Image (cartoon, rainbow, N blue to C red):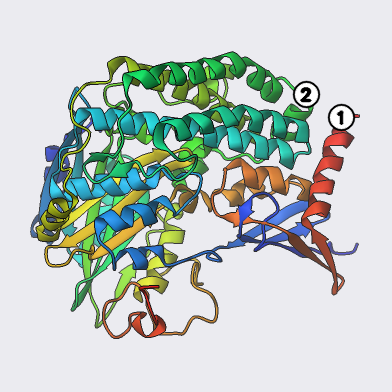
């Protein structure tokens, strides 16, 4: 009897699935993964340190650039943290506009993710279909805020731009577009046999693990943990709205915590976001959009404020939390700590990937919608000989697996 | 255990730890048109009861640990553990922020990974960013800082161990 040899398979720091760097080291036995280790920090830019040398209004724009995709949740969380420290009351109308913009972001982020997930398993037609559908919401965001991506609409104590009555028809048109296309998107992702074969019973995260590892967002909800800041806490307008946490059993009656369940949660959340925006438009209160429109006055007030506060918000990927400490002497905050959702979802990759095949790495890694960065090459060390697998090769392996299953 | 109000949570801690709870305050905020409320609890506790306090919190409900933040306060380092409980119920969540001061002369804190395994990443972060030794941490490696980052420099420190020397021009 010979002992089985295991191999180490490093993937990254340029990542197999998404756009940002993270390094995995897999221990593999044949095709099975029996050990997972990960290294992050390749894009640590010291943003908090930069922020601690700038005033809160300047930080807003840095916070917005922490992440290109969730550029709404970071300014919201930061504003809420500062507003909590300084006891600033946000006008009701601003709370509603914040909610509308945050939900528009969720629509674009979830559909973007759906396209990426399809690409990872070799369905590039579905990638193009979903991204074509996504364009509509980007156009709407541009129409409402002036920018497609970084919206620059938030400020401490409110928002900088109003939504007026004459803008309603375009918003309604876009929302109707999503209602009409939702069924098509749903049947493409949930009824397709190949997608089911690649995603069901794959990358499982149990409810117990999700709780213990403090996972957040659709990743944890797909495992049955009802944790959604929008439901749990009254922030922005969410306290007024009719909202329930989305778990996969709403659609299928069961919770498996696999990749398929994560697709269900994100798709249903797109429909939920459309509904929330409609609720907001119906109830949009009149009034001011800023607590203090004079920025120098606001900054002078914040400079005199002492204390610490936190702000939580639900990003498309999960809970974001910002901690701010103001010392009452300087304009710049004494401490600014940012925690993005992927930070908490890192550890949940380990139980998800254990026991899976190498070809499943891209889709399982992508299934948490990681927000860090991306891959180009993989080195396999085999009998001390290095073989370089580039992203195309890894992608090809994944496509082959889909084809094998489809035959 | 029945669901506790924020006041009862503070009493629950005060009853058990008495004067070791140095400060407790409830922050009540509201938002939206209906002005629905939410609560943040801030507890300042003594280092000696830290781990017991976390276990005590777990007896209410298994908490979600969002992150640990750190402040360099000159003589001391303050760690703030941002927990939340009662999530999952509509508008029921309560944030419990537990802060503990540790002296710079002996910067040590116990690991809570045995209670909440999800604390590992953030404990590794405070270890490299603040130079706090986390005792019994299951994985002692750095997480965000690269291997060649100089030893004995801690980016979140504001004293001579801070990163100032590594930064040339922050205005660019």
Side of B85 relative to A372 (left or right)? left
Asked if labels 1 and 2 touch by Cβ distance under 8 angstroms, the answer is yes
The residue nearer to you, when weighing A184 against B99, is A184
> In the image, what residue occupies the spot 51% across and 25% down?
A270
Estimate the x, y position of residue A92 in percent, counting from the top left. 21, 28
Chain to which mark 2 belongs: A
* Element marked by disc 2: helix
Which type of secondary structure does the marked residue at label 1 adopt?
Answer: helix
Residue A6 occupies quadrant: bottom right
Mark 2 — residue? A193
Residue at figure coordinates x 38%, y 79% from the top left: B169
For mark 1, name the chain: A
> In this image, A289 relative to B146: left or right?
left
**First-in-chain label (2 vs 1):** 2
Spatial distance from mark 2 to mark 1, Cα to Cα?
8 Å
Image coordinates for residue B22, horizontal then vertical, percent: 10, 59
Residue drawn at (22%, 66%) of the image: A334
Q: Is residue A362 visible?
A: yes
Residue to which mark 1 is pinned: A406
At a point 81% along the width and 52% down the height, the residue shown is: A392
Could you say which is closer to the camera, residue A229 or residue A300? A300
Residue B81 in view in this figure: no
Can you say whether A129 is above or below A159 in the image? above
Other-residue count near label 1 (Cα within 10 Å), few / some / many at <14 / 14–19 / ≥20: few
Question: Which of the 4 image quarters holds residue A99?
Answer: top left
In the displayed structure image, the side of residue A287 where residue B123 appears, left or right:
right
């Amino acid at each position: 009897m010979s002992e089985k040899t295991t191999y180490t398979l490093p993937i990254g720091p340029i990542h197999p699935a998404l756009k940002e760097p993270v390094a995995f080291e897999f221990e593999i036995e044949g095709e099975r993964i029996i050990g997972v280790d990960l290294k992050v920090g390749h894009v640590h830019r010291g943003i908090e340190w930069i922020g601690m040398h700038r005033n809160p209004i300047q930080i807003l724009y840095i916070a917005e650039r922490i992440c290109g995709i969730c550029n709404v949740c970071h300014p919201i969380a930061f504003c809420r943290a500062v507003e909590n420290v300084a006891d600033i009351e946000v006008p009701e109308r601003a709370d509603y506009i914040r909610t509308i913009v945050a939900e528009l972001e969720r629509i674009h982020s979830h559909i973007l993710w759906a396209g990426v997930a399809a690409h990872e398993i070799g369905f590039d037609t579905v990638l193009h279909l979903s991204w074509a559908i996504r364009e509509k919401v980007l156009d709407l965001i541009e129409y409402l805020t002036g920018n497609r991506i970084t919206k620059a609409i938030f400020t401490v104590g409110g928002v900088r731009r109003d939504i007026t009555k004459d803008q309603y028809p375009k918003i309604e048109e876009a929302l109707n577009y999503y209602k009409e296309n939702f069924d098509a998107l749903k049947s493409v992702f949930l009824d397709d046999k190949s997608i089911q074969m690649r995603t069901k019973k794959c990358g499982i995260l149990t409810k117990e693990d999700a709780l213990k590892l403090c996972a957040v967002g659709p990743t944890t909800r797909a495992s049955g943990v009802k944790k959604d800041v929008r439901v749990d806490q009254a922030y922005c307008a969410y306290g007024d709205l009719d909202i329930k946490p989305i778990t996969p059993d709403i659609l299928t009656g069961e919770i498996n915590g696999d990749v398929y369940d994560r697709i269900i949660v994100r798709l249903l959340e797109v429909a939920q976001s459309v509904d929330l925006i409609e609720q907001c438009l119906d109830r949009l209160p009149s009034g001011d959009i800023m607590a203090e429109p004079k920025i120098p006055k606001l900054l002078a007030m914040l400079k005199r404020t002492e204390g610490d506060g936190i702000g939580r918000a639900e990003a498309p990927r999960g809970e974001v939390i910002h901690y701010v400490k103001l010392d009452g002497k300087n304009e710049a905050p004494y401490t600014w700590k940012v925690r993005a959702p992927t930070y908490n979802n890192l550890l949940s990759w380990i139980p998800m990937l254990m026991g899976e095949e190498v070809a499943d790495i891209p889709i399982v890694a992508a299934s948490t919608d990681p927000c860090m960065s991306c891959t180009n090459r993989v080195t396999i060390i085999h009998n001390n000989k290095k073989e370089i697998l580039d992203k195309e090769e890894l992608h090809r392996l994944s496509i082959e697996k889909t084809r094998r299953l489809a035959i | 255990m029945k669901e506790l109000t924020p006041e009862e949570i503070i009493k629950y801690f005060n009853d058990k730890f008495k004067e070791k709870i140095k400060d407790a305050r409830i922050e009540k905020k509201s938002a939206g048109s209906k002005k629905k409320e939410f609560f943040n609890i801030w507890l300042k506790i003594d280092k000696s009861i830290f781990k017991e306090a976390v276990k005590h919190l777990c007896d209410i409900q298994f908490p979600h640990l969002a992150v640990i933040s750190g402040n360099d306060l000159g003589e001391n380092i303050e760690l703030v553990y941002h927990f939340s409980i009662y999530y999952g119920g509509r508008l029921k969540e309560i944030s419990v922020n537990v802060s503990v001061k540790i002296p710079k002369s002996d910067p040590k804190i116990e690991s809570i990974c045995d209670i909440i395994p999800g604390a590992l990443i953030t404990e590794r972060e405070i270890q490299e960013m603040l130079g706090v030794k986390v005792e019994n941490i299951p994985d002692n490696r750095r997480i965000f800082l690269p291997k060649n980052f100089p030893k004995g420099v801690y980016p979140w420190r504001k004293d001579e161990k801070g990163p100032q020397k590594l930064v040339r021009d922050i205005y660019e």
